[in-house]
Image: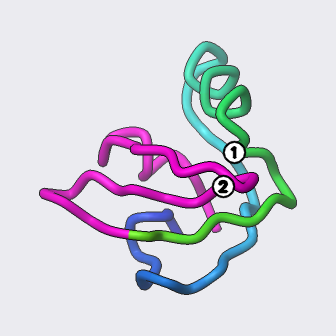
């Protein structure tokens, strides 16, 4: 399921990062890699603030649907 469907505060394992190669490379540079963990901190207007690799990152809704957990 996409990251947008996860509950806040719940730690999830990233299964796959989709999108075109440029988008995948960008998300992987932020720490969104298969096998890594991601936790949703907050959701504001569809956009997510997540904790990934001990960093807080803001991700747009369009990017979040490409991250499968």
Across and down, in percent, residue 69 comes to 64, 68
Label 1 close to label 2 by CB (< 8 Å): yes
Q: Which mark is residue 49?
A: none
Across and down, in percent, residue 30 comes to 65, 34
Observer-nearest of 55 and 14: 55
Q: Quadrant of the N terminus?
A: bottom right
Residue at image coords 75%, 62%:
15
Q: Which numbered mark, 1 or 2, is in the foreground of this view?
A: 2
In magenta segment, residue 52 = yes
Q: CA distance from mark 1 to mark 2?
A: 7 Å
Instruction: Give the structural element (helix, strand or loop) at label 1.
Output: loop
Q: Which of disc 2 and disc 1 is earlier in sequence? A: 1
Tell me which colouring the rendered structure shows. Answer: rainbow
Q: Residue furthest top?
A: 22
Q: Is residue 51 left or right of residue 37?
A: left
Query: Where does label 2 land, which residue?
Result: 52
Observer-nearest of 67 and 57: 57
Q: Image quarter for residue 27?
A: top right
Q: Which residues are magenta?
A: 42-69
Query: Where does label 1 land, which residue?
Result: 32
Q: Is residue 1 left or right of residue 53?
A: left
């Amino acid at each position: 399921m996409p990251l947008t469907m996860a509950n806040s505060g719940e730690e999830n394992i990233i299964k796959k990062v989709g999108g075109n190669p440029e988008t995948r490379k960008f998300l992987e540079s932020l720490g969104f890699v298969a096998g890594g963990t991601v936790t949703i901190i907050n959701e504001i207007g569809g956009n997510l603030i997540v904790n990934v690799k001990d960093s807080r990152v803001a991700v747009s809704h369009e990017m979040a649907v490409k991250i499968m957990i």
